[in-house]
Image (cartoon, rainbow, N blue to C red):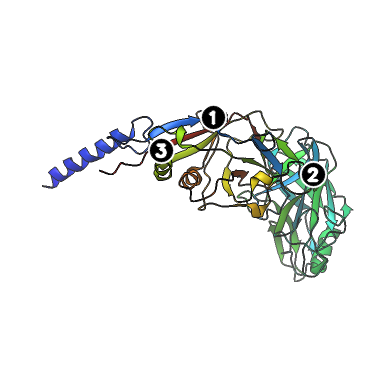
Amino acid sequence: MLRYKGIIFSLILFTLILGCTEKKNSLGFEGENPPQEIILGDSIFVEIEGNKFYSFEDSVKNYSTNSKLLVGNYQINNFPNQARTLFRVTTTPDTIQSIDSEIVLTLPIKDKNDNFLGTELKFGKLQQGWTSTETDWFTAIDSTDSPQWQTPGGDFIEYEPLSVTLSGDSVLVQLSEDLMNEWIENPTENYGMIIYTETAESIVEFYASEAATRPYLDFDYTYKDGEAATFHKTFTHDVTIAKTDEQYEIYPDRLIFSNLQPIRSFLKFELLPSYFSGINDSIDFRRMTINKAELYFTRKDDPAYFRQATASLKPYLVIADTDQLDPQDQTQPLIADDDYEEFFNIASADSLLASEPDIFKVDISRIVQHMVANEVENKGVLLRSIYENRDLQHLEFEPNVELRLIYTVPMIAE
């Protein structure tokens, strides 16, 4: 009996697998009502102020859980940007008799461009308290100090290390005993350091304390009781802050996605019953099932810095009246954070396809299903990187976007 049950189960499993191999039939259903596939092109996208697509800048924000620390000067859409790294080590020894070795700060490199040599890095002693979860180019945020930097980009006095060398995949910075003794003897005034550069087009990404490969500070020392010890600690606080001009440029008929400065894209498409075979009226249209809806993009060109093998975009449902958008107003982002919402917590696992490295797809199935069912108003879709403010990932796509759908017409009641 068990053998027969096993044979029956195998036959059922084989039938299901065979059904799923049918092209354009993502669910593996056969019979009178199989899913159908359509590809919709440029004609479905709605023009607003004469343009089908809009990309626009948003403000630079804090990214405290970043596994990267960015330092450099870079150009994004012809605007000069700058990134600096702040760090602090607060777990220094309490009291010591002597420091018995060089004090070396090791900064492991994740990526860099050809202009980066290491020696152009500059350092400063921060003069104000800051919190890694809230600080940015303009704001320090500390309960004991002023919430604002007096000078945008951080309040610091220049500090010249004893040496800065590029050694393999790390930058080694030798600090002075005076600086370390200052941190040990006055821990409440240890605001940490800032790393920056004044060299044009010099970019480096270091690993942060959240990464598996971490930066660290180490030296040998002797306690006052004569006991020898080694200090080897990573940063207790670190963060990247990036410059912004507080102007939110708009790029008509372009599809740009950038992390620093964040650039997002907006598009609106029209879905009509006449596009779908087997849909006879508005009732059928509302009742049909959207099995899959994906936007397909084609990469336009390589980014200026650090080409990425993968990328992740996330779609959001726009809830503002997009007919009233003002593409001429650059004093605020084209679409504010309150004008769109996360829809059913759609997880983004989108990436550049391995089989077609310049093709990118974004799943918007749930959004389209609710649009055709007339459960949400179609005011458009906003797309943004899930890693905004993290790094210099920058993608631009051709404006020839496709919406590919797999749908099932509603069954006719007998």
Count of all numbered marks drawn on residues in the image: 3
Kindly identify the amino acid type of the residue bearing the numbered disc 3: Tyr
Is residue 17 or residue 266 the one in the foreground?
Answer: 266
Residue density around tag 2, few if under 14, some if 14–19, many if 20 or more, within 10 Å: many
Gap in angstroms between the C-alphas marked 3 and 2: 47 Å
Task: Find residue 360 and report its image quarter.
Answer: top right
Is residue 390 or residue 209 the one in the foreground?
Answer: 390
Among the two numbered marks 3 and 2 on one chain, the one whose residue lies closer to the N terminus: 2
Is residue 403 or residue 355 the one in the foreground?
Answer: 403
Residue density around tag 3, few if under 14, some if 14–19, many if 20 or more, within 10 Å: many
**267 left or right of 127 in image:** left
Q: Which label is found at residue 41?
A: 1
Residue 78 screen position, x and y as percent? 79, 35
Residue 358 screen position, x and y as percent? 57, 29
Task: Find residue 45 and report its image quarter.
Answer: top right
Determine contact: label 3, label 1, CB under 8 Å. no
Q: Which label is found at residue 407?
A: 3
Kindly identify the amino acid type of the residue bearing the numbered disc 2: Gln
Task: Find residue 41 and report its image quarter.
Answer: top right
Kindly state the secondary structure of the residue where label 3 is placed. strand
Q: Which residue is mark 2?
A: 82
